[in-house]
Amino acid sequence: MDGQLALVLGATGGVGGAIASALIEHGWSVRGLARDVPAAERGWPDDRGTISWAAGDAMNGADVIHAAAGTSVIVHAVNPPGYRQWDRLVLPMIDNSIAAARAAGGARIVLPGTVYNFDPATTPVVGEDSEQMPRSRKGRVRVEMEARLEAAARSGVPSLIVRAGDFFGADARSSWFTQVMVPAGKPLRRIINPVTAPGVGHSWAYLPDLAEAIARLIGMNEKLRPFERLQFEGVWDADGTALPAAIRRVTQRPNLPVTRFSWWAMRLLAPFGGLPREIAEIAPYWRYPMRFDNRRLVALLGEEPHTPIDDALKATFRIGTP
């Protein structure tokens, strides 16, 4: 893979950083786009390999085009700062990536996907051809993002979408795991389970495994379709109890309390807008089980990267790390 250059938008974030690190491990040269390059350089861990930084903003089309020069891949793992005005800014940002990929001569755009494109009540298994019937504003934006990538693929800009469940891992920052289930940076006093009722399954993705899968897929560009939609199965918790049980096990705290997330409070506050409204809108995704059909991904890779759940959680909690 020597000589191949990838631009990662969102390399300072959890998902983008993990993908950038996996690409470096696979021999790619990686360029990150950052509004504050000195801060990005300070924040990039030494053990992740070397990344070069370009100054710029993913919301500025000229910046993205400039940073994408000479690349064959653009990883679009970026969101507006603080997720503010998400529904207004996300589509212009994907348009900037498409324009940059076209200017680079047809670089492939890689988009980490979600389940928000689908109606959880009618889509127990998410496949590449599952009907997209979003239940939220976020979902409708996601559908339009994919539609724009599909249109671009018909005119010389290929793309790869890899959908996955909720992230966990040592560097998974903006996730239900680190912000709700076991809040990062706080003493572990309880596990808050967002699953709304006993017996409801949920899909999780250990971020290093997902990043490894994406890096391997990027490396087999000649085998990918111009517009490729894949599913990463990850960790399937069939009844919503397996992940909390594993957390108790690896932390050696068998009596750690498990409580339910206060969805009622989010519904009560939702009419006032802001974060409660955003959270209330995605409650159905914790009310119905949704699993990912990874057959096409496995057909391409031979297997899906998978770290045993106990090992993945030990790495997440940095258990045994000096």
Image: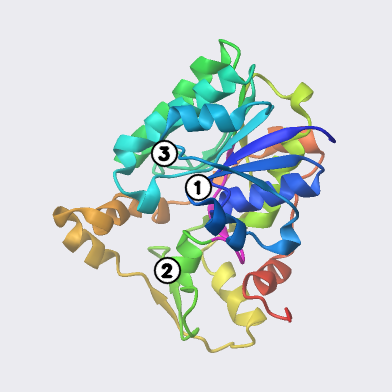
The answer to whether one can see residue 149 in this image is: yes
What is the span of residues highlighted in magenta in the rendered image?
162-172
Q: In terms of depth relative to the viewer, which is nearer, 20 or 199?
A: 20
| Image position of 59 with respect to 185: above or below | above
Dot 2 or dot 3, earlier in sequence: 3
Residue 204 pos. (x, y %): 57, 56
Question: Where does label 2 land, which residue?
Answer: 180
> Quadrant of the image for the C terminus?
bottom right
Q: Residue at x 28, y 55 (%)?
A: 280
> Horizontal and vertical percent for residue 9?
55, 41
Q: Is residue 160 visible?
A: no
- Element on which disc 2 rests: helix
Give residue 223's position: percent from left, percent from top.
Answer: 77, 24
Residue 290 disc label: 1
Which class describes the residues within 10 Å of circle 1: few (<14), some (14-19), or many (20+)?
Answer: many
Q: Nearer the viewer, mark 2 or mark 3?
A: 2
